[in-house]
Amino acid sequence: MDLHFGDAEPTAEERAAVDALLGPPATAWEGGDRTAADLRSAARAEQARDRLLPALHAVNDRVGWISDGALTYICRRLTIPPAEAYGVASFYSLFSLEPRPPRVLHVCTDLACLAKGVREVRDGVPSPCLGLCERAPAALALEAGETPKAVVYGGSTAEDETPHTVERPEPPVEDAVPQAGSPGLVLLGRIGVVDPASLDDYRANGGYQALRRAFELGPVGVIREVTEAGLVGRGGAAFPTGRKWDATARQPDQPHYLVCNADESEPGTFKDRVLMEGDPYALVEAMTIAAYATGCRKGYLYIRGEYPRATRALETAIETARARGLLGPRVLGHDFAFDIELRRGAGAYICGEETAIFNSIEGYRGEPRTKPPFPVEKGLFGKPTVVNNVETLVNVLPILLTGGSDTKLFCVSGSVGRPGVYELPLGTPLRELIDLARPAGTLKAVLLGGAAGSFVTDLDVPLSFEGTRAAGATLGSGVVMVLDEEVDLPAFLVRIAAFFRDESCGQCVPCRVGTVRQEEALHRLGRRRSEADLVLLREVGQTMRDASICGLGQTAWNAVESAIDRLGAFK
Amino acid sequence: MQPPRRLIDVEIDGAAVRVPEGSTVLDACRTAGKDIPTLCHGDTLTPKNACRVCVVEVEGSRTLAPACSRTAEAGMVVATDTERARHSRKVVLELLASSTDLSTTPRAKEWMADYGADPARFGEEAATVAQPPKVDNDLYVRDYGKCILCYKCVDACGEQWQNSFAISVAGRGFDATISTEFDVALTDSACVYCGNCVEVCPTGALSFKTEFDMRAEGTWDESEQTTTTTICSYCGVGCNLTLHVQDNKIVKVTSPHDNPVTHGNLCIKGRFGYGYV
Ligand SMILES: Cc1cc2nc3c(=O)[nH]c(=O)nc-3n(C[C@H](O)[C@H](O)[C@H](O)COP(=O)(O)O)c2cc1C
Ligand code: SF4
Ligand code: SF4
Ligand code: SF4
Ligand code: FES
């Protein structure tokens, strides 16, 4: 490839940030000093496209934005065409390609926070759901520098005059789990009970017994147990996990990859964050078991960029596990090599889609790929790949130890006294969950499954995959957002539409333009009722559902449709 | 020479057709004599299947399928003209026409009429991608107000043909555009002016400067143009050039896509060196 680079030079700080990640440059071609060796031989360039996202993070974390000079330097180091790298950098909302102050306050203006009264952003930039819904309204301050800082703010009210300037310590994880410590919790059993940083504590509380059992069972045995337990994916699509694992394990093409999807960005979802913050070793152990069963030597843990505490917890857990022989060339002394690489997203909901996540990890724009081929056949780097959600993976531990938990995590937010993550048996009536969370105000509707889900008013619907489907809804990622009579429904729907418009990758026409037209029509309908606009919404909605490439466009009309049909919005 | 391919049977709108294995549903539809609209599909590129005007119903599939990219399978049952498929095509055309200037997209008008598309119903305030054309060099113009983001130019410039990687899709969602790095002028980019992006652009968003200027003057008139195909004399490769002539002047140069060596691709000399022909 004969690449063309501009003349822009990086500043010393930008260069240092990139070099800290990639090591010093080897040749002048890559932006180092010209040496005699360079003149004799053609430059040897590193081919490492997948380092692009980490390199962009390195600069953005250090300086707060990515200049022409910094981008050019990264491109030289990694042999990437500058136009492509620009296309990638401009895809992610956490990166800035224009100068901005080091400290940026991301104020959540999404559903749960909207329901809690956030209206305007006084001293920051508006952000899609930050996954802090139990502490709504929430904000996240990111500060660039040699040691980048991230401070989470929750529970500040509109009247609070100095909400986001004073640093406050984050409340303990278990504050997000109202049932914490109660017996009977399986997936949440260790939250608030163990020290998330301590491997010894984890082991003292049942940790790494499932992996031992997995080694006894062998890969085929593990897949059999997971299949027999009937585990289905918790990331939203409810696909049988055992079938996915079996299909991957059987692929002759090598290597196989494991990707843990911790991009959790569905508005109203924060269960994976709580699991990762409170019980990070469980995820590391579960990934190790998944890798063992499906024949992967390498796992990627793709975590959303707005989750600083979960990222720190997992960094510690992965390092400690590696140091103690629980990751690496001989896991637990067995002839099984496995390691995990943590990858941070950079502000793009779509990167949670199971093929967009591959493009993001590989250093391309996070656009979903066309299926078929499916990930089990051609996934990350074109190789057979198993992608699983955090909660799905953590479910594997009790399956190997006790045959399974048959519980599900629910993220309750909105108009309730005790918002948070709840663990209940699948099939529990919605009413029971809401009662646990202490409803406040007169209930109007419940948004099940997040922005891609739908509204229900029947509180007797059983919270199971089949039960919600029969009710024309979906469990999705476990979002249960409670709305009372006070809610401004038209504004709420506009916010849902704006979310999809903002987060559409832009690849296909039905979604790229359809989400814009949907939002426009909802704005108009908020001002005055119009039969023509309702028809338009339906027609555009049907086309997004039928003709979009991926699940984002296909579900972008669900919630609005259910609000019109079930809540009588715009009647 | 490729080995002969096995033939498979598929059903298109009730009629059985036989196509070579590996064909797309679009190939099968065309074999069956169906005229399916396409925009992001081109005969020389692997399509990104982004425009979705070619969607059809495939039995057993939850969503509609892009005919241009779905591989035909033995026994597949395809319906091209159902209400559901026509509905999506209609709305997709409306979405495109309401946001993008399709005035130089061949056949757009005809399809809009066929499908009863009415882009005006989104209202006067509907967001568009209207923007001033980028005229930053003497050879070709980028008028992204006409761009439907079909990815063809990016693929032609990048790994599918040219390997120059001068342009990419930047931004996200409705704000996504085709762009050089930091939107620098083409003259500061990696562009080598092969014009292969112009060759594949389905909307006229990319056009020869001559065509752009003549359109602005109102003198562009395809009915007055004649074409002659010759062999480029600049080097020994022997690329075919199709010279488009109006009023005794060469107004643009294309290249036949069925040329087995060049597939319609040229270099700057063949494409833009016509001053010397
Ligand atoms: C737009 C979009 C966003 C998604 N985001 C996530 C996510 O953040 N986390 C997740 O686990 N799955 C997400 N999914 C679902 C994944 O595509 C995939 O189904 C899932 O990761 C598979 O894991 P599972 O079988 O364990 O659920 C998303 C899907 C779509 C269409
Ligand atoms: S449906 Fe939306 S998010 Fe998905 S590929 Fe199309 S434009 Fe991108
Ligand atoms: S003229 Fe050639 S090099 Fe320039 S952008 Fe178009 S395809 Fe790329
Ligand atoms: S400029 Fe033309 S070829 Fe490029 S994306 Fe736009 S419409 Fe397609
Ligand atoms: S022509 Fe098939 S999706 Fe564009």
Image (spheres, coloured by chain):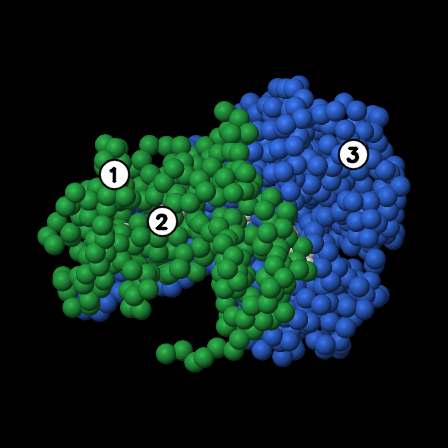
Chain colours: A blue, B green
Badge 1: few (under 14), some or many (20 or more) residues near its Cα, within 10 Å? some
Residue named by callout 1: B220
Reply above or below: A316 against B117.
below
Distance CA(mark 3)–CA(mark 1):
55 Å
Badge 3: few (under 14), some or many (20 or more) residues near its Cα, within 10 Å? some
**Quadrant in which residue B142 is drawn:** top left
Indicate left or right for A229 with B234 as reference: right
Give A523 or A149, whichever is nearer the viewer: A523
Q: Is residue A417 visible?
A: no
Q: Which residue is pictured at 17% across the width and 56% down the height?
A: B269
Residue A402, given in percent of the width and then of the height, sits at 84, 65
Residue A356, given in percent of the width and then of the height, sits at 54, 54
Give the secondary structure at mark 3.
helix
Q: Which residue is pictured at 84% across the width and 31% down the height?
A: A439
Mark before the other along the chain sequence, 1 or 2: 2
Q: Is mark 3 within 8 Å of ligand 1?
A: no
Q: Is mark 2 within 8 Å of ligand 4?
A: yes
Give the secondary structure at mark 1.
loop
Residue B211, given in percent of the width and then of the height, sits at 25, 41
- What label does residue A566 carry, if any? 3
Distance CA(mark 2)–CA(mark 3):
45 Å
Residue B32, given in percent of the width and then of the height, sits at 53, 62
Q: Which residue is pictured at 81% across the width and 65% down the height?
A: A229
Reply above or below: A557 against A84.
above
**Quadrant in which residue A109 is drawn:** top right
The reply to whether dot 2 and dot 3 touch (C-beta < 8 Å) is no
